[in-house]
Amino acid sequence: MCTYGKIWMIKYPEKDDMDDIHNLEVCCFKQPWSKAMLEENFSLDNYFFVAATVDGYYVAYMMYMVIAGEVTLNRICVLPQYRRMGIAEALIKLLPDNMDATLEVDVNNIGAIRLYQKNRFTIEGKRKGYYGCNRDGYILWRRYEK
Ligand SMILES: CC(C)(COP(=O)(O)OP(=O)(O)OC[C@H]1O[C@@H](n2cnc3c(N)ncnc32)[C@H](O)[C@@H]1OP(=O)(O)O)[C@@H](O)C(=O)NCCC(=O)NCCS
């Protein structure tokens, strides 16, 4: 796919790519997941990783799990210089759409909230202090319509 002259591609990471995925965590999150956590989740059958690359380099990824017929989006991030090109939206469109999906997001993360709402997630609850002192989290759901 191509936006603003940058060609990016969807890629399904492999175990050996966890250094690259960890680099995305470090560049995108204040509290990145450790490489060990990523590797542990990658080894589980119900965790899924989907990424995007530019010129072979990882620029974005998402991780989700499927438990009891529900999808939970655990992580999604895009390197700052590749944002607002539709990459996160393209990743979200690859979530399974035949079951309910849920996620948590910091109430102050307006960009991410807009992204989710644009992709049919709606706010259904709030967790006080979920992200630390005075940082609440919204719980969003996208309900599967049979
Ligand atoms: C949130 C994040 C994943 C969005 O990635 P992205 O590739 O820039 O998002 P997209 O380009 O696919 O945006 C799709 C839509 O989301 C919304 N959106 C995304 N970023 C936004 C922002 N900063 N402000 C407002 N709306 C935003 C817009 O509706 C956008 O559509 P539009 O460009 O047509 O207006 C990225 O900013 C990021 O990695 N943030 C840091 C990590 C993070 O917070 N992850 C989410 C944790 S819950």
Image (cartoon, grey):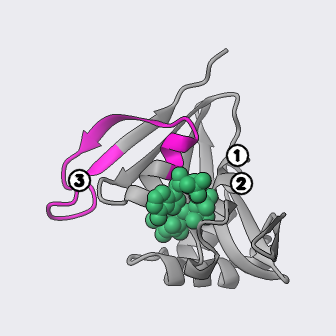
Q: Which mark's residue is nearer the viewer, 1 or 3?
A: 1
Q: Tag 2's secondary structure?
A: helix
Question: Disc number at residue 40?
Answer: none
Picture residue at 51% right of the left edge, 46% below the top: 116
x and y, in percent, of residue 33 in the image: 48, 74
x and y, in percent, of residue 109 in the image: 37, 60
Picture residue at 38% right of the left edge, 78% below the top: 30
Q: Relative to the observer, which residue lies in front, 67 or 118?
A: 118
Label 2 to label 1: alpha-carbon separation: 5 Å
Q: Relative to the observer, which residue lies in front, 56 or 47?
A: 56
Q: Tag 1's secondary structure?
A: loop
* Residue at the disc numbered 3: 136
**Left or right, 48 with reference to 35:** right
Q: Which residues are magenta?
A: 115-138
For the image, the number of numbered tags is: 3
Residue most toward the front? Answer: 4
Disc 2: residue Cβ within 8 A of ligand 1's nearest atom:
yes
Q: Are marks 1 and 3 in contact (CB under 8 Å)?
A: no
Quarter of the figure with residue 43: bottom right
Earlier along the polypeptide chain: callout 2 or callout 3? 2
x and y, in percent, of residue 90 in the image: 71, 54
In the rendered structure, which amino acid carries the disc numbered 1? Lys
x and y, in percent, of residue 97 in the image: 69, 33
**Left or right, 36 with reference to 1:** left
The quarter of the picture where the N terminus appears is bottom right
- Seen in the picture, residue 117 relative to 25 is either above or below; the reply is above
Question: Disc number at residue 90?
Answer: 2
* Residue at the disc numbered 1: 93
Q: Are marks 2 and 1 in contact (CB under 8 Å)?
A: yes
